[in-house]
Image (cartoon, coloured by chain):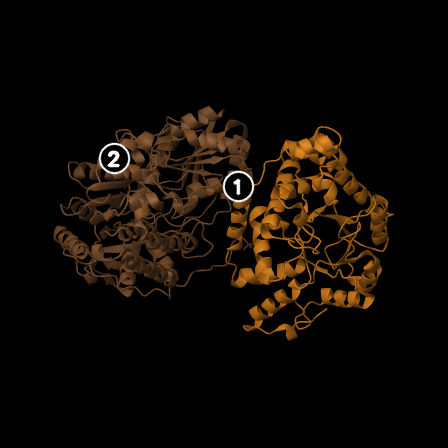
Amino acid sequence: MTSSQLAMARLNTGERALALLGGEATDANLRRYLHGIPGIDAVGLEQRAADLGSRSVKTSSKKWALDKIISLIDLTTLEGADTPGKVRSLVGKALTPDPGDPACPRVAAVCVYGDLVPIAVEALGSAHAAGTDTGVNVAAVATAFPSGRASLAVKLADVGDAVAGGADEIDMVIDRGAFLSGRFGQVYDEIVAVKEACKRADGSFAHLKVILETGELNTYDNVRRASWLAILAGGDFIKTSTGKMVPAATLPVTLSMLEVVRDWKRLTGARVGVKPAGGIRTSKDAIKYVVTVAETVGEEWLTPSLFRFGASSLLNDVLMQRQKMTTGHYSGPDYVTID
Amino acid sequence: MTFLDYAPAPESQAVLHLRPDYGLFINGDFVPGRGVPFQTINPATEKPIAMIAHANTADVDTAVAAARRAYDRTWSKLSGSDRGKYLFRIARLVQERARELAVAETLDNGKPIKESRDVDVPLVAAWFFYYAGWADKLDHAGVGPTPSSRGVAAQVIPWNFPLLMLAWKIAPALAAGNTVVLKPAETTSLTALLFAEILQQADLPAGVVNIVTGGRETGQALVGHPDVNLVAFTGSTGAGRAIARSVAGTDKKVILELGGKAANIVFDDAPIDQAVEGIVNGIFFNQGHVCCAGSRLLVQESIHDEVIDRLKQRLSTLRLGDPLDKNTDIGAINSADQLRRIRELTAIGEQEGGERWSPACVLPDSGFWFAPTIFTNVSTSHRIAREEVFGPVLSVLTFRTPAEAIAKANNTPYGLSAGIWTEKGSRILAVADKLRAGVIWANTFNRFDPASPFGGYKESGYGREGGRHGLASYLKPAAGRSAARTVATAPAESSPELDAKAPVSRKKAAK
C-alpha cells in the first residue's frame, strides 16, 4: 500500500467520502467529484471489450474457467410466481449442480425475493454459508426491487425484513430517477441508509450489492459516475442490472465497472466486488467475463467475495460444457437438472 | 499455472498447402527466376518455409513486357464494369481463403494471428471490394470526365503488412485500368505468391498482374525500367529518396509512402483508459512495424505519472510469444536486420539518458524477439524521439499547453500521422488543424478504411492511397483536356506541405 492508501484505509466509509469529496455528500460536492472523473470514449471501450472477448480459452484453461464460473454464480429466481417449493428446488440445484459429478463445485449464493429468504435459509440447513466462503449464501433483492419506486421507509423496511429473515447479502436498487435528475446526494444518502439497515443485531452487516440498472443510465459516463457514487457511499459490490429490463449486463458496461473498482483500489487500497447480472446465458459469454476480470483487475478478483454472476439459465449451459469436457461429447438439456 | 497463462491455443496450419518452392508470377503463370533462389524463413523460429525465386533484370524485362502487352491488348480495352467483376471476384476469393492467407502471413511475417486474421486479411478483402465498386465510376474520381489509365504500374511494397500493402497498391491500379508489376519485400514474398494463385482462380487475364520476387536490385530494375508509367513505393524514407532520384527527369508518376514518427498527444481531459489502449495500439500493434505508429507519446505534464503508471500496468498483461497462438498480442520482429536496428537505437536511447522500461517477459530462444519497451525522460533532441525505430519502442515526452504540444508534434522531418486524445471536441478540431500530418486520429489510433485517403507530409512521402484520392493517383485527365484549366484551381505545386491537405486529386490532375 502507498502512504495515501494507508491514510485512506484508516478512515471509515463516511470519513473517506468526506475526505475525497472535500466536504459533505451534497449534490454540489458529488457533482463536482463525479464530473471530475475522466470520461469514457464509448467506441474505445467497446473495442477493448471486444478484444478481451476474443481471447481463446481452451483445454485446461477452459476447464478451470467453467468450475470457477459455477462457484461465482448467484443462482437466481425472481418471479412473481415464486413459491416455497420453487425456492427449495433452487436450493437443491445450488447445492448439487450436477448430481452425476460430486466434484462439481457449488454456486456462491441463491438470490430470491425477501419474503422467501427464510425458506432458502431453512432449505440450505447446515450448507448455509452465512457470509463465509464455505457453503451457499442467501442473497435477497430489496428496496422495492426492481423499480425502486417507493418511499425510503418502505425500502428500509424491505431490507430489514430480509436481514432479519437471515439474508447474508442484500441486492438493492438505486433511485435512477434521482440519479438522472442530478440528485446525487439523495442516491448517496439512500445507499448509506440501506447499508445501515443491513446491520444485524450482533453488529455485523449483510453484504450490500448496489444495483445501478445500467440499462436505464444509458451512457457509460453515467455508469462510471454511478459506480463511484455507490462505492463512495459504502457499497460492497456494484451490480449492473436487475435482469428485469433489456439491456442488462453487457461486457463493455462490466468492463467500465471493473475499471472503477481497479481505480478505487489504487486510490484507497480497498477491494469492491462487481456483479454482472442478466443476459449472460452461455459458457462462452461467461468466459469472456472471466477473462475481462482477470486482465482488468487481476485474478485475485475471481473469488465469490469480489465477483459474481447474476444468472439463472447460465448454470445449465456451463454444466453441459463441463460434461462435454469430461466425456468428449455433448449431452443435452435432459442430462442436466432443471430447478 | 495461473488462469492468465492461457493454455496454448494455436491456429491450425492444416489449411495451408505450401509448395516447397515458388517461381515468379509472369503472364499468368509461375515461371522460374534467373537469379539465385532464396529461402523465406519464419521469423518466430528461424525455420525455412519455402524457396523463393529471384528475378534478375531480364526477368523484370519479361514481366514489364507482359504487363505492357496485357495493358495494350486486354485490360485497357475492358469496360469498367468488367474490370470491376474481376476485382469483386478477387475480393470474394480472398474472403474464402482468409484463414489460409492469415496463417501464411503470420508464418512469414511473424505478426500475431489475431492481427492477420482480424485486421490484415479482412482489410485486404475490403480494399478490393471498395475499388471494385469504383471501376465503372471513374468519371467521378475527381480528374474530370472519361479519365484514362496511366499504363504499367511498378509497385514495390514493404514487409510490415505484406498482403495489405499489396491490396493498397493493386486494387486501385486495376480499377483505374492499369496493369501491374509488383515486387514484394524480400523477407515476405509468400502471401503475394498465394495471391497470385487467387488471380489464377479468378481467371484474371494473363499479364494484368505480375509478381517478381527478389532483393533490392530487383526493385531497382523494376522502378528504373523505361517502360513503366507509374512507380508506387511504400517503405523507408532512404529507399524512397533513392527512387525519387532514379525517376527524376522521366515522365513517370511517383507515389511514395515513407516513414513516420507520429505524435500521439494525450491531453489532461482525455478518456484515460481508452487513451492507454490507444497508446498501446498505436505503438505495439504489429510489433511497432507500422509507418504511422504512434511512436512519440506526448502527454500533458499534469497527468504524466498517472498515464505512465497505467500504461505500465497494461503492458504487463500483453502476451508475447508464438505468433500462431490466438492469444498472442506481440509477435516476432520480422528479420534479424530489423532486430539489430531496434537494439542499436534503444541502446542509444539509454546512452542519451532515456529511462528504459519493459514488462517482465520471457523471450523465446530462437527467432527474432524484442520486448515492448517504453522510454521516459525523453527530450526532443534524443535520437529515439527523432528517428523511426520501426519496432515496439515508445518514447514519452511531455508538454504543458496545446501550443507546445502542436510545436513538438510538428518538430519532425516526418508527417504521416498523429493522434489526439481529449474529450473536448473543439480542441480536437483546433489541434488537428495545426498538425502537419496526413492522417490524424481523434480518440483512436491505427484505424484504416478503404474509403479514407492515407499519405504523408514532408519526408513521409507524397501522393495518397485509399479512397477517391488513391484512385486518382492511378488516373490522368482525358487526352486533350489541358492541364492549364486545373492548374488554375490547384494549390502551388511547389509547396507540398501546404497542399497535402487539399484534395489530392486536383494536384494529380495538374500533372
Q: Position of residue B45 (x, y in %)?
A: 34, 55
Q: Which badge, 1 or 2, comes first in the chain's sequence?
A: 1
Numbered mark located on residue B400 in the image: none
Please name the residue that numbered disc 1 is placed on.
B274
Q: Residue at x 53, y 36 (%)?
A: B309
Chain drawn in brown: B
Do discs 1 and 2 belong to a common subunit? Answer: yes
Count the labels in the image.
Answer: 2
Query: Looking at numbered disc 2 in the image, what kind of residue is underneath it?
Result: Arg
Q: Is residue B328 above or below residue B89?
A: above
Crowd around label 1: few <14 · some 14–19 · many ≥20 (10 Å): many
Amino acid type at circle 1 is: Gln
Image quadrant for the N terminus of chain B? Answer: bottom right
B104 or A32: which is nearer to us?
A32
- Asked if residue B413 can be seen in this view, the reply is no
Q: Chain of mark 2?
A: B
Q: Which mark is residue B485?
A: 2
**Are circles 1 and 2 on residues that touch, CB within 8 Å?**
no
Q: Quadrant of the C terminus of chain B?
A: top left
Quarter of the image where one finds residue B194? bottom left
Specify whether B163 is left or right of A52: left
The residue lying toward the viewer, choosing from A61 and A20, is A20
Give coordinates of residue B143: x percent, y percent: 28, 42
Q: Residue furthest left?
A: B58
Q: CA distance from mark 1 to mark 2?
A: 47 Å
Q: Closer to the observer: label 1 or label 2? A: 2
Q: Is residue B376 above or below residue A215?
A: above
- Chain with orange colouring: A
Q: Secondary structure at mark 2?
A: helix
